[in-house]
Image: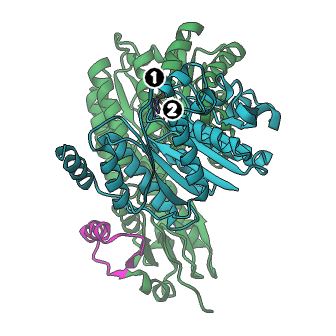
Amino acid sequence: MKKIAIYGKGGIGKSTTAANISAALSQQGLKVCQIGCDPKNDSTRLLLGHLCRRTVLDTVREGKEVTLADVVHSGYNGIKCVEAGGPEPGVGCAGRGIIVALEKLTELQALDEEDVLIYDVLGDVVCGGFAVPIREGYATDIYIVTSGELMSLYAANNIAKGVRRFALRGKVRLGGLIGNSRNMPNEKELLEAFARRLNTRLASFIPRAAVVNRAENLRQTVLQYAPDDPQAEIYRRLAARLLSNEELTVPTPLDFEELEDLVIKYGAAD
Amino acid sequence: MALQTKRYINWRNSCSCSMTGVWEAVAFAEGAVLIFHSPRACAHVARTMELYSHYRTLGDLRPETLRPIPVLSTQLTEKHTIFGGGEQLAACLRYAAAKYEPRCIAVANSCVSGVIGDDVEAVGAELEEELGLPVLTVNCYGFLNTEYHDGYYAMTRELIRRFFKKQPKEKGTVLLLGDCGGPWGLYASEVRRLLQALGLKVIGQFPGYMAVDEMARAARAEAAVILGGRGALYEGLRKIARQLEQDYEVKALGAFYPVDLQQTRQWLLSVAGFFGKEEEGRRLIAAEEEKLQSALNGFLPVTKGQKVLLCLGRQLDYFDPATTLELVELLRLDLLGVVLLDAYEPKERQEVLAKVQAVTDAPIYDTAAAEKLCEKVRLVLTTHELQYPVPQLFLPMIPEVGYSGTLRLLGAIYRRLCSRKERGGLTYV
Ligand SMILES: Nc1ncnc2c1ncn2[C@@H]1O[C@H](COP(=O)(O)OP(=O)(O)O)[C@@H](O)[C@H]1O
Ligand SMILES: [Mg+2]
């Protein structure tokens, strides 16, 4: 079983990318499960065609015995869709929620028969809860979605720090960066240089494309909405890469000044 | 017999829970209900404390006349750690209001509600409106950055803010401020006895032991007497006394405490002075000291010249060596030396040393010397239990107060010296 986690700054495109990867893998005939670990609950929206109606933590809140059928929903092409769920903004502790939700899934043995698990995790690893997918051996291959913008790189670098900490004592490794373009000058070169500095590689550079948004408006992935579009092919290649990737590394994060210098260097080369 | 040397552990920062302090501030405040906004298990802290106080009052042979207020727990579970405990607290407040029809509800917060960031203050304000009933909250969460006494002082301030009213004074009245073992304890009893002997009226002990309805009349007291001791622990109490003075014109009496003979004298004179009863004060002191002297006359034939050792390891915040050395002096004991136990850190050891040397010429020793010295004495006065087979008298944690307290300790030492052929064992006073 391949256990992948997708991290990255909020709004950078984690869920969109994860859903397209899941769709691509399922089209190859693999049994895929995508697990949203974000109290926003929208990770699997493009696969389900709607917002997830029942999250793992909904069942905890109701205080009922949880069954598999309650929390594992079937989405596009038979992809299993799970949302951890979480509290309303401003109350409770979403991080604790992630911990409990993942424990519940383990208890249910919900994910034992899949070929691929994809965790889609809130990017800024604000507390220990959001590090659990890296920490407890849930996912072993970590990918970080980032654009060339400084704050996105900053978040990516922080996530790399987290991965490094846990990589030094366990099986978790960094699989690579997934560039999601914001159409900045020299963005791809910058991301490649950043990846080298992190001791990893740029697994894919995904162009910013209107078809992504058109598909999203119909609550679909590009793979479902426009399978022949070049953008779909990009997601398919990325998915294949994730499956076969053997270059899993312990990252070497930068300090903030180095990161700034890198951004200035490539921005100035414009 | 080979004896292993016991190491003394000294907890510099006591890790205590502020919830119990909040509880203590309202423990017997008739009309109040307390909610522990906490997992169920936290409520056991209160259970244990209640049991201790029960034993203490049993030990003091004082009848308890007040009833402890109901204590509830919101029983936070995993679910609340994720989704927040606010609704649960609201439900518990409604339940408490309906079941007990209290005059106010106090809320003590646990670490859990602090970690997940429950907005307890907002819930309190909302429910106060809904229930038409004061809901008192404090900004302390379990042991997160707060200690027991933070909770105690925070809730005390809140009680004053909510219930105290500025008003004309009733002549010759005193409010006792603080706890020190409660109204049945030896401290408050002795203070009350001395105040009454001066012809003053004690209108109550606040917080903790005053009914909610009485608090509105508490500021009729002319003065507040602080029940306290040395050290930072009581600084909060002094602050509260100053606040009462400023905002409610209740004069704070208690720059020092009646914890040894000299200070008791001073204390009585200053209290008597404030109420214009200097003459009564002097007469009382004379009468009390005469009683003490006649008791001493009975003790001295036994105690005079008896060899004793003093072993000290307690922090100065809780203990003043001079008080014990005064007893040694009064009983004319032969002090073989003073052992400073390992419990002190270097800086505090210096301070203790200075204090001891200011009042006695007896030689000073380290822990290592204690065992040998113990063999040479009839009795060891000690702040720590020693593992040597020698009679020991454990110096009490709460300072002995006034004449009764001093007499009690003198009597205990005397009785211990009366018994013969003793091999060892520890006496608690
Ligand atoms: N390659 C892309 N081209 C165009 N729009 C994109 C692309 N990737 C993501 N988006 C859009 O960005 C927004 C945020 O994406 P989302 O996947 O929800 O981010 P995250 O899960 O990281 O918070 C969505 O509206 C999505 O359609
Ligand atoms: Mg998302």
In the shown orientation, is residue A32 left or right of residue B376?
right
Residue reaching furthest front?
A228
Asked if residue B156 is positioned above or below residue A33 in the image, the reply reads above
Q: Which mark is residue B25?
A: 2
Q: Amino acid at mark 1?
A: Leu
Location of the N terminus of chain B by quadrant is bottom right
Within 10 angstroms of label 1, few (less than 14), some, or many (20 or more) residues? many
* Sequence order check, earlier mark of 1 and 2: 2
The subunit letter for the residue under badge 1 reads B
Badge 1 and badge 2 both on one subunit: yes
**Rendering coords of residue A138 (x, y %):** 64, 53
In the figure, what tint was chain A given? cyan
Q: Which mark is residue B209?
A: none
Q: Which mark is residue B159?
A: 1
Determine if the magenta segment contains residue B340. yes
At x 46%, y 45%, the residue is A125
**SS label for mark 2:** helix
The span picked out in magenta is B336-365
Asked if residue B111 is positioned above or below residue A161 in the image, the reply reads above
Asked if residue A83 is positioned above or below residue A257 in the image, the reply reads above
Between A149 and A245, the residue placed more toward the observer is A245
Determine which quarter of the picture holds residue A81: top right
Between A209 and A217, the residue placed more toward the observer is A209
Q: Amino acid at mark 2?
A: Ala
**Rendering coords of residue B289 (x, y %):** 38, 50
Determine if the magenta segment contains residue B41. no
The subunit letter for the residue under badge 2 reads B
**Rendering coords of residue A67 (x, y %):** 82, 36
Tell me whether the residue at label 1 lies in contact with that at label 2, contact meaning CB atoms closer than 8 angstroms.
Answer: yes
Which chain is represented by green in the image?
B
